[in-house]
């Protein structure tokens, strides 16, 4: 596990569990390990790493710990990733999950999965599938999910083949999971999602929105929005299409009225819920005479969720259909939409865009996106040029993760390795030095 991966796991654990909860869960896991470790010859360092992975999996999927399939997946994760005997894994996971239910069972933040009506195993597997299908090679989905390469490899392979299928079929040609008992459930998910993607190319983003709401909102607030996920998605898309900057609440109210005809949730309610879910933020408060106007804007998470819908629709409406408009007026595009446009651009479009871009792309997310897109288009020389102009001594610590992912794509190139070694030896930020070292490995 790299330095950044380790740090990201700790940050996620701390953001989900408060300190008393975290300490209680850690004690339960440690006690369960100590009772069994000696009988299976597991060293203490291996035990500590394994405990961290279990704690991360519980934190990352806290809303799903009571789903029966979660236990099976966690057991197989220990067997396949840590080479732990199945008997040990099953015994350990059973005890840990029972302890966690006792510790967290009365907290509504950890029982929201029950609100997904019926078929919770299928819903959990759909949640994992959507995350894998929406990922890119540089997004670190394995670390994000913490459930092992076996499951993710099967899901990602199936996701990649889903768009290429001419007909929905019966799922018999889909890759088999490493958990044979969920093959039937997986086949039904493939059929359902393949049909849905044909009807709406960005339907997976609607699913992602639902699962984000489930993760971020408590039981009561999620129940308010659960019946209106599609309306909420259209609302966020409409904000993104209408304005690339902040919008006043009155204008947002008109948009929400057009998306939500039932009016079960008013504009004040939807604003509060979306702010709590981390999808909009208050960007400004302006006075108009005696009136006070609150302006709201989409967060990066909301931009990522709506980017596919925006870029695909804009491309379809373009008379030229070349996909070149994103770099002609980049200041009028949201950052998340620029990322998506870059990712979808062909090699020819990227080559035409490069001369029009500034010599140095300072934004780390956009720089990473451009480098990844160029590498995918077999334009490694151009990608190296962007990287070398971007990675200078003044890069801030906030760029560390983007540096690591982008550099990993180019680490075989001597000039890139030389620059990374210089950064690793002399940069003042520990995070940036760690990112450079990790990319070199």
Image (cartoon, helix red, strand yellow):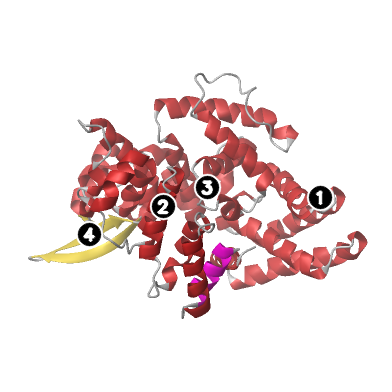
For the question of whether residue 10 can be seen, the reply is yes
Nearest the eye: 21 or 332? 332
54 sits left or right of 195 in the view: right
Give neighbour class at mark 4: few <14, some 14-19, many 20+ (Cα, 10 Å): some
User: Looking at the image, which residue is at 42% across and 46% down?
Assistant: 224
Disc 1, disc 4: CB below 8 Å?
no
Does label 2 or label 1 sit earlier along the sequence? 1
265 sits left or right of 77 in the view: left
Q: Is residue 199 above or below residue 42?
A: above
User: Looking at the image, which residue is at 46% across and 28% down?
Assistant: 196
Does label 1 or label 3 sit earlier along the sequence? 1
310 sits left or right of 194 in the view: left
**Mark on residue 90?**
1
Q: Nearer the viewer, mark 2 or mark 4?
A: 2
Q: Nearer the viewer, mark 1 or mark 3?
A: 3
Q: CA distance from mark 3 to mark 4?
A: 36 Å
Magenta stretch: includes residue 197: no
Measured as percent of width and height from the top left, residue 407 is found at 49, 60
In the structure shown, which secondary structural element does the residue marked by tag 3 occupy?
Answer: loop
Does label 2 or label 3 sit earlier along the sequence? 3
Does label 1 or label 4 sit earlier along the sequence? 1
Magenta span covers which residues?
430-440
Q: Is residue 277 above or below residue 18?
A: above
Q: Which residue is mark 2?
A: 381
Q: Which residue is mark 3?
A: 137
Q: Residue furthest left?
A: 289
């Amino acid at each position: 596990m790299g330095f950044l991966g380790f740090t990201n796991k700790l940050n996620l654990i701390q953001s989900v569990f408060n300190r008393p909860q975290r300490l209680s869960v850690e004690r339960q896991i440690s006690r369960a390990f100590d009772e069994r470790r000696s009988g299976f010859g597991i060293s203490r360092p291996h035990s500590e790493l394994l405990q961290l992975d279990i704690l991360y999996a519980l934190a990352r999927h806290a809303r799903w710990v009571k789903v029966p399939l979660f236990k099976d997946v966690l057991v197989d994760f220990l067997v396949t990733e840590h080479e732990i005997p199945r008997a040990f894994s099953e015994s350990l996971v059973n005890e840990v999950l029972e302890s966690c239910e006792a510790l967290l069972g009365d907290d509504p933040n950890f029982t929201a999965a029950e609100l997904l009506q019926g078929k919770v195993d299928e819903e959990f597997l759909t949640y994992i599938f959507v995350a894998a299908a929406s990922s890119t090679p540089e997004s670190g989905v394995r670390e994000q999910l913490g459930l092992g390469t076996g499951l993710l490899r099967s899901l990602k392979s199936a996701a990649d083949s889903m768009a290429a299928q001419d007909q929905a079929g019966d799922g018999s040609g889909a890759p088999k999971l490493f958990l044979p008992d969920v093959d039937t459930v997986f086949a039904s998910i493939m059929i359902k999602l393949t049909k849905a993607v044909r009807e709406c190319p960005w339907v997976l983003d609607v699913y992602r929105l639902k699962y984000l709401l489930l993760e971020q909102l408590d039981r009561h607030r999620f129940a308010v929005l659960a019946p209106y996920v599609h309306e909420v998605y259209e609302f966020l898309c409409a904000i993104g299409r209408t304005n690339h900057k902040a919008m006043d609440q009155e204008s947002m109210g008109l948009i929400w009225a057009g998306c939500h005809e039932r009016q079960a949730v008013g504009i004040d309610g939807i604003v509060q819920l979306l702010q709590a879910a981390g999808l909009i933020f208050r960007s400004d408060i302006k006075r108009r005479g005696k009136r006070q106007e609150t302006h709201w804007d989409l967060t990066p998470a909301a931009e990522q969720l709506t980017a596919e819908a925006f870029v695909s629709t804009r491309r379809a409406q373009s008379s030229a259909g070349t996909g070149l408009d994103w770099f002609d007026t980049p200041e009028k595009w949201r950052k998340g939409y620029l990322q998506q446009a870059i990712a979808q651009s062909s090699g020819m479009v990227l080559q035409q865009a490069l001369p029009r871009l500034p010599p140095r792309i300072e934004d780390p997310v956009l720089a990473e996106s451009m480098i990844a897109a160029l590498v995918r288009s077999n334009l490694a020389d151009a990608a190296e040029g962007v990287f070398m102009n971007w990675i200078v001594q003044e890069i801030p610590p906030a760029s560390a993760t983007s540096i690591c992912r982008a550099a990993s794509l180019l680490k075989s190139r001597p000039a890139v390795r030389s620059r990374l070694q210089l950064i690793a030896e002399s940069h003042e930020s520990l995070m940036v030095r760690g990112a450079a070292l990790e990319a070199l490995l």
